[in-house]
Image: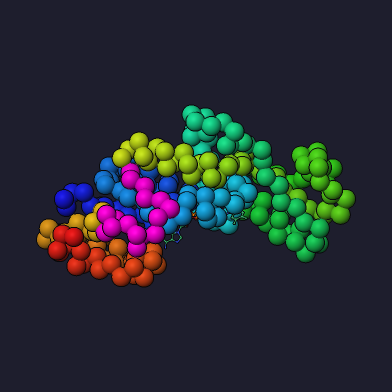
Amino acid sequence: MADDRAEVLVLGAGISGCALAFHLARRGVDPVVVYDPQTPAAGATGRAAGIVTEQLWDPWDVAVARESKEEYAHLADRYDRSAFAVNGFARWTKAREAVPVLEAAVERLRSWSVPVSVLDPPTLAEKVPWGRFDDVLGAIWSPDDAVVTASTMGDLYAERARELGVDFVLGTPASRFARLRRRLSPRPLRGGTRQLKRTPRAYLWAPLTGFGRSRIDFRKATSSGE
Ligand SMILES: Cc1cc2nc3c(=O)[nH]c(=O)nc-3n(C[C@H](O)[C@H](O)[C@H](O)COP(=O)(O)OP(=O)(O)OC[C@H]3O[C@@H](n4cnc5c(N)ncnc54)[C@H](O)[C@@H]3O)c2cc1C
């Protein structure tokens, strides 16, 4: 029975939770359980505009955006081409004092190998034909940026994760899910510090998940085998 318990419990089945579960399973973590009291698109993932831009503020974020685009492109190519498009990303301003900020951004972004160029208003109007840019004083453009349907990407990660054995518990309040108690209980200690490091997290998260409200005592459930 102990082996039936979650090694990792992911709270939230938005794009982050689904992608995390997929990557953990891919790296051999098992079992992984994703729990969400609602549905995968209930949070921000179901509302996102889906812009994936490298016009960011530090090199780590740029690297994450770049890698994300690669992964999204790969997933979309394989499962749903409509969920990903490289259409470029423009930022512009009509505030004179913001123009040097944009120019500095170009310099900074180029130093991180982000392909970005300065646009004059007529060229910007060509890129974004439905816009009105006659009062624009500065604009920058990164042609490799993309847009995704975030909820579809979340679904694709979830599907891949399921294929790898990840279990999803969705749309059910924990208080009504008796078997969740067993599956979400951490494994019993086997004397290793690895276990000691991991198990408290489940307890720490418990009040946030509503498990606290349902008054489930995980430690008791674990030791008594309920
Ligand atoms: C209007 C809008 C536009 C956006 N546009 C962009 C954009 O263009 N580009 C971009 O990169 N980002 C954008 N974002 C941000 C992006 O949507 C979020 O960063 C991303 O979706 C976060 O994903 P997530 O999985 O972390 O969170 P969410 O999608 O919010 O998922 C969190 C999940 O956790 C669940 N949950 C809540 N409480 C608990 C609990 N106690 N236990 C277990 N589960 C719980 C919720 O039900 C939810 O399903 C936008 C956001 C909004 C709102």
23 or 53: which is nearer to us? 23
Name the residue located 57 percent from the left edge and 37 percent from the top edge. Answer: 83
174 up-or-down from 126: above or below: below
Name the residue located 77 percent from the left edge and 64 percent from the top edge. Answer: 97
Is 213 magenta? The answer is no
Name the residue located 14 percent from the left edge and 63 percent from the top edge. Answer: 224
Residue 42 in the image: state x and y as whole percent.
52, 53
Q: Is residue 114 visible?
A: no
Locate residue 130: give its quadrant. Answer: top right
Span colored in magenta:
166-181
Residue at the limit of the structure toward the right, as seen here: 134
Left or right of 173 in this view: 62: right
Residue at the limit of the structure toward the left, as seen here: 191
Residue 170 in the image: state x and y as whole percent.
41, 51
148 or 217: which is nearer to us? 217
The tally of labels here is 0
